[in-house]
């Protein structure tokens, strides 16, 4: 199981490719919003998966397997893997690498220079700002990953909810990606238009500070209703901080944005 989780985690690296892809597709004036919407609506899959698998498919599969919960849960995990495989095929078959076409064609015609992946990674890794962003992003996206993995179990153990109910409640955190991460990128772009890079930095600082305050309040909530309400606002600032992060990444070292995106 641990090995399988390792490979699932490696597959999650497609997020980095998506952020680099969006950075190439959109101008810097709106890249914060573009990256935030791509990442946010992608991460929304965490909330959708919690809801669909825990509250819809799991009960259905329990009926199919004569109320055998363990077999039902193990089998239902096949569904997202099939969806991911279909999406991978469509992405490879119908997408372009950049507005001007695919990288292979651009390099073949001399429009795009050959760049060593090792050299690009080295340049990104020795940039001090890369590691500052790494820490800042860990403080927001790391929190989201933890919540996606532990929220359902927390509501089940702490408030005595059923598996289905706990999954539905936990999915709220992921559903906030529908607008909250995009909002963070949008605020970052607005702040950049008014104050330049300092505006983007101030936006992220405020989002992270509010996130930190609300996680303390959430951890000390004693009522189910109060915990849900606080989680909604907590999630809002977590996602907004993530969105503001990738409004900064393309500015660190533009030629090595892919490597920096991966490190962050």
Image: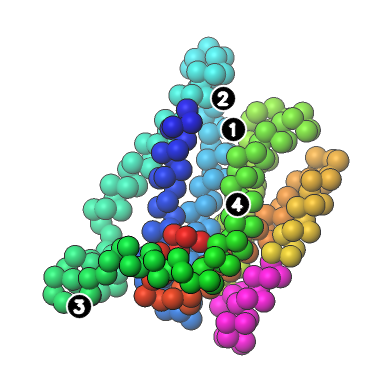
> Of circles 4 and 1, which is in front?
4
Q: Mark 2–mark 1 contact, CB under 8 Å?
A: yes
What's the magenta region? 187-207
Q: Secondary structure at mark 4?
A: helix
Determine the CA span between mark 1 and mark 3.
Answer: 50 Å
Q: Is 44 left, or right, of 259 in this rendering?
A: right
Q: Position of residue 61 (x, y in %)?
A: 50, 22
Q: Earlier in the sequence, mark 2 or mark 3?
A: 2
Residue at 62% x, 82% y is 198
Label 3: element kind: loop
Residue 206 spot, x, y in % from top left: 71, 70
- Give the residue number, with chain letter if any, for mark 4: 142
What residue appears at the point 45 percent right and 24 percent down from the top-left corner? 75
View extreme (top): residue: 66
Q: CA distance from mark 2 to mark 3?
A: 54 Å
Q: Main secondary structure of the magenta part?
A: helix
Q: Which residue is mark 3?
A: 111
Q: Which residue is mark 2?
A: 59
The answer to which of marks 4 and 1 sits earlier in the sequence is 1
Q: CA distance from mark 2 to mark 1?
A: 7 Å
**Crowd class of label 4 (few under 14; some 14 to 19; many from 20; radius 10 Å):** some
How many numbered circles does the render carry?
Answer: 4
Whether residues under marks 4 and 3 lie with C-beta atoms below 8 angstroms apart, the answer is no
Left/right of residue 228 with respect to residue 55 in the rendered view? right
98 relative position to 130: left or right: left
Q: Nearer the viewer, residue 119 or 253?
A: 119
* Mark with earlier residue (1, 3): 1
First in residue order: circle 4 vs circle 3: 3
Q: Which residue is mark 1?
A: 55
Give the colour scheme of this rendering. Answer: rainbow
Q: CA–CA distance between discs 4 and 2?
A: 30 Å
Mark 2 or mark 3, which is nearer to you? Answer: 3
């Amino acid at each position: 199981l641990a090995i399988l989780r390792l490979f699932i985690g490696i597959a999650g690296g497609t997020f980095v490719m998506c952020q680099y892809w969006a950075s190439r597709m959109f101008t810097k004036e709106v890249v914060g919003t573009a990256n935030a919407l791509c990442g946010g609506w992608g991460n929304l899959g965490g909330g959708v998966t919690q809801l669909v698998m825990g509250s819809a498919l799991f009960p259905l599969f329990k009926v199919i397997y004569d109320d055998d919960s363990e077999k039902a849960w193990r089998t239902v995990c096949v569904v997202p893997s099939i969806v991911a495989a279909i999406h991978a095929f469509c992405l490879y078959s119908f997408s372009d690498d950049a507005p001007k076409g695919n990288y292979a064609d651009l390099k073949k015609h001399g429009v795009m220079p050959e760049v060593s992946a090792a050299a690009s990674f080295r340049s990104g890794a020795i940039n001090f700002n890369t590691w500052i962003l790494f820490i800042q992003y860990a403080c927001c996206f790391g929190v989201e990953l933890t919540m996606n993995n532990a929220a359902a179990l927390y509501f089940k153990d702490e408030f005595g909810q059923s598996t289905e109910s706990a999954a539905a409640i936990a999915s709220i955190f992921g559903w906030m990606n529908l607008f909250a991460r995009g909002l963070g990128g949008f605020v970052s772009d607005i702040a950049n238009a008014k104050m330049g890079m300092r505006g983007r930095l101030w936006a992220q600082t405020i989002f992270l500070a509010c996130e930190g305050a609300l996680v303390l309040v959430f951890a000390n909530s004693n009522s189910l209703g109060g915990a849900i309400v606080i989680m909604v606002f907590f999630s809002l600032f977590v996602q907004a901080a993530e969105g503001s992060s990738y409004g900064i990444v393309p500015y660190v070292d533009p030629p090595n944005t892919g490597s920096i995106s991966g490190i962050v």
